Image: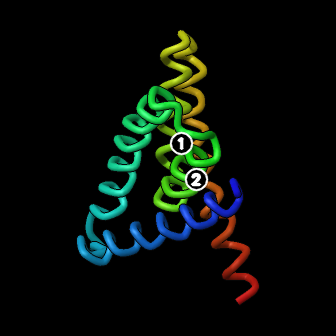
Amino acid sequence: MTLLLIGVGGGVGALLRYGLSVWLGRGGEGFPVATLVVNVSGCVLIGLLVPLLKGWNVRESVQLGLLVGLLGGYTTFSSFGRETFGLVESGRVGMAVGYVGLSNVLGVVGVWVGMVIGRGWA
């Protein structure tokens, strides 16, 4: 049941992300407003849902369907924000800064490596 909820949630989250991107416009060569809105709203939603779901004693499978499935399909940036906040909240600020830096730098480098390989294969 947990896997089904995660899968359905992920599909719905992906459709929501796509729909919001279409509605806001993709931005072309301009600033990626749609992605920013999706990422920030995903962070707000995960910050809102985590304490609410725990406080309301929602079943773990439903929590996972919403947090991992729905918000994971909508944006993994929400998980990134939650993890970073957890590090800061637990007093591991240096680790949080390192995590943010590594995630961003390695993410961009990863896209570059993938593009180089993909263009070589194309």
Residue shown at 54%/62% (left/top)? 9
Residue shown at 69%/79% (left/top)? 118
Where's residue 63, x and y in %? 56, 43
Q: Is residue 19 left or right of residue 85?
A: left
The numbered disc on residue 79 is 1
The disc labelled 1 sits on which kind of residue? Ser
Q: Is residue 119 visible?
A: yes
Q: Is residue 9 left or right of residue 4?
A: left
Front residue (pair 67, 2): 2
Examine the image and state in which quarter residue 116 appears: bottom right
The numbered disc on residue 40 is none
Measured Cα–Cα span from mark 2 to mark 1: 14 Å
Whether 74 is drawn above or below 21: the answer is above
The disc labelled 2 sits on which kind of residue? Gly
Residue shown at 37%/36% (left/top)? 48
Front residue (pair 34, 12): 12
Where's residue 68, x and y in %? 59, 50
Q: Could you classify mark 1 by the number of other residues whose Cα lies within 10 Å: few (under 14), some (14-19), or many (20 or more)?
A: some
Whether 120 is drawn above or below 90: the answer is below
Q: Which residue is mark 2?
A: 65
Quarter of the figure with the N terminus:
bottom right
Q: Is residue 28 visible?
A: no
Where's residue 115, x and y in %? 63, 72
Q: Could you classify mark 2 by the number of other residues whose Cα lies within 10 Å: few (under 14), some (14-19), or many (20 or more)?
A: many
Mark in front: 2 vs 1: 2
Whether 88 is drawn above or below 35: the answer is above
